[in-house]
Amino acid sequence: MKKPFLLLVLSVLLGNCETSSELLFNELPNEGWEQGKWETFTYRNRLANKKASLHWILRHDNDYPYATIFFIAALTTPKGITQYDTLNYRLANADGSWLGSGMYVHELSLPYVERFLFEEPGNYLFKLRPAVRSNDRIVADSLLVGLHQIGLEIRTLSDD
């Protein structure tokens, strides 16, 4: 009798924790991501007052030369209001080992906005570009090598 009851409780709890997510990915050029080039993602929101968490998904290999990455992000609402943000993420441990999953191509989920409210239906425009420079140089690399894909994950949150 205890096993069926426990399974019922677990299925109810897991069912209530379920969230949906949407992934949008862009391939980056083989020769590298230009520092001034924006990668653009358009998300069509169909529901008013939808809550979500936003994450950038980065896929890179061992040719990426830095332990961190900096981005400039821009978010434009359907009303045309644009908000900019500077983002800094650590990609490697102090010993040089990469964070994230994967052996040859490493994937990291980089938190962007923990609780974002899609206030109205319509198209939301997300833009991201790198803003990385070496500590020992004033001029930044024009191309960032070793980056394969950048993506945006939109995880719908429950109304809790």
Image (spheres, rainbow, N blue to C red):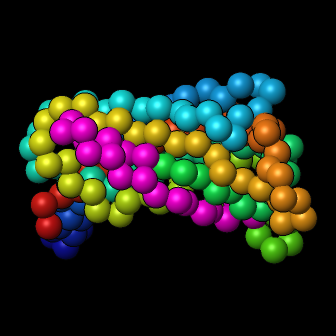
Q: Which quadrant would the C terminus be assigned to in this image?
A: bottom left
Query: Residue placed at 43% from the left, 46% from the top?
Result: 74
Q: Could you say which quadrant of the image residue 26 lies in?
A: top right
The answer to whether residue 11 is seen in the rendering is no
| Magenta-drawn stretch contains 114 | no
Query: Residue placed at 52% from the left, 42% from the top?
Result: 128
**Magenta span covers which residues?**
74-92
Q: Nearer the viewer, residue 23 or 139?
A: 139
Q: Could you say which quadrant of the image residue 32 lies in?
A: top right
Q: Main secondary structure of the magenta part?
A: strand
Query: Residue placed at 13% from the left, 60% from the top?
Result: 159
Most extreme residue toward the right is: 136
| Magenta-drawn stretch contains 85 | yes
| 38 displayed left or right of 23 | right
The answer to whether residue 121 is seen in the rendering is yes
How many marks overall?
0
x%, y% of residue 105? 74, 41
Q: Could you say which quadrant of the image residue 95 lies in?
A: bottom right
Query: Residue placed at 29% from the left, 37% from the top?
Result: 124
Q: Which quadrant would the N terminus be assigned to in this image?
A: bottom left
Q: In the figure, 29 relative to 46: above or below?
A: above
x%, y% of residue 104? 80, 42
Q: In the figure, 37 relative to 1: above or below?
A: above
Q: In the figure, 158 relative to 64: above or below?
A: below
x%, y% of residue 103? 77, 47
